[in-house]
Amino acid sequence: MIPARYAASRFPAKLMQDLGGKTVILRTYEAAVQTGLFDEVYVVTDSDIIYEEISRNGGKALMSIEEHECGSDRIAEAVADMDVDIVVNVQGDEPFIDRKSLQNVIDVFKDDPSKEIDLASLMIPINDQEEIENPNAVKVIVDVRNFALYFSRSPIPYRRDKEASIQYYKHKGIYAFRKEALMDFHRLPMQPLEATEKIEAIRYLEYGKKIKMVETNASGIGIDTPEDLEKAKKELK
């Protein structure tokens, strides 16, 4: 499922911007299909423009009926009546999908016979201090089994001991959910930590869900700003 809003505060209509002769959202959709990992791929949108763009090019699109605060809610509405086990959320502004990373996230559930894991996601090692301190880069800390302990826009952990050896990780917003966990998210109200940080993954933690994090070095280019779009054009060339 690729949730796709037309409006975006930092870069309005970014998903309909031209990227080497195709729109950003169409490139993302085609990249998801081309991985060969999914039984079905849909764009889920509140926009007639995006719906028509995908449908006109032979893709599958669904219109959201309700207004939604985040991608998880939009996807939950779309899959409510579908007979599925695992739902993967690919961001609409991520046209450079890394197949291996997605495969690793999906494989988490194959090695979980007791169904301990509610959802899985990706984390990327980061070492640049500016990125560590950047509130737009969501950081994640994990336990010894790589289950998420917390997500924050602040640098976590705080480096009180300057000599301590610690690796910082950035959260990459690709998720694989058990359907039940996704429907729970949609049903349960937002709590104070999620409301404060504006990070939807925190809601799962606040309600006791288990998030398995998978390390990857494939950062790709997410298109949040016009500058990102220019980088993506160069990458495509």
Image (tube, helix red, strand yellow):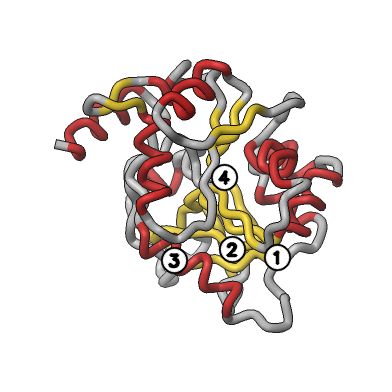
Q: Residues within 10 Å of mark 4 (few under 14, many from 20)?
A: many
Q: Are the residues tagged 4 and 1 within 8 Å (C-beta)?
A: no
- Mark pair 4, 1: CA separation: 17 Å
| Along the viewing direction, whichever of 31 and 67 lies nearer the viewer | 31
The kind of residue tagged 4 is Met
Task: Name the residue carrying label 3.
Answer: 103
| Residue 200 position within the rendered picture, expressed as x and y whole percent measured from the top left | 67, 44
* Mark 2 neighbour class, 10 Å CA radius: few under 14, some 14 to 19, many 20 or more: many
Residue 76 seen in this snapshot: yes
Q: Residues within 10 Å of mark 1 (few under 14, many from 20)?
A: many
Give the amino acid at mark 3.
Answer: Gln
What kind of element bears circle 1?
Answer: loop
- Amino acid on which disc 2 is placed: Ala
Local packing at callout 3 (Cα closer than 10 Å; few below 14, some 14-19, many 20+) is few
Between disc 4 and disc 2, the foreground one is 4
Please give the label number shown on residue 1. 4
Residue shown at 61% from the left, 32% from the top: 62
Residue 123 or residue 51, whichever sits in front: 51
78 left or right of 56?
Answer: right
Which residue is pictured at 64% across the width and 27% down the height?
Answer: 63
Q: In this figure, which residue is indicated by the disc labeled 1?
A: 118
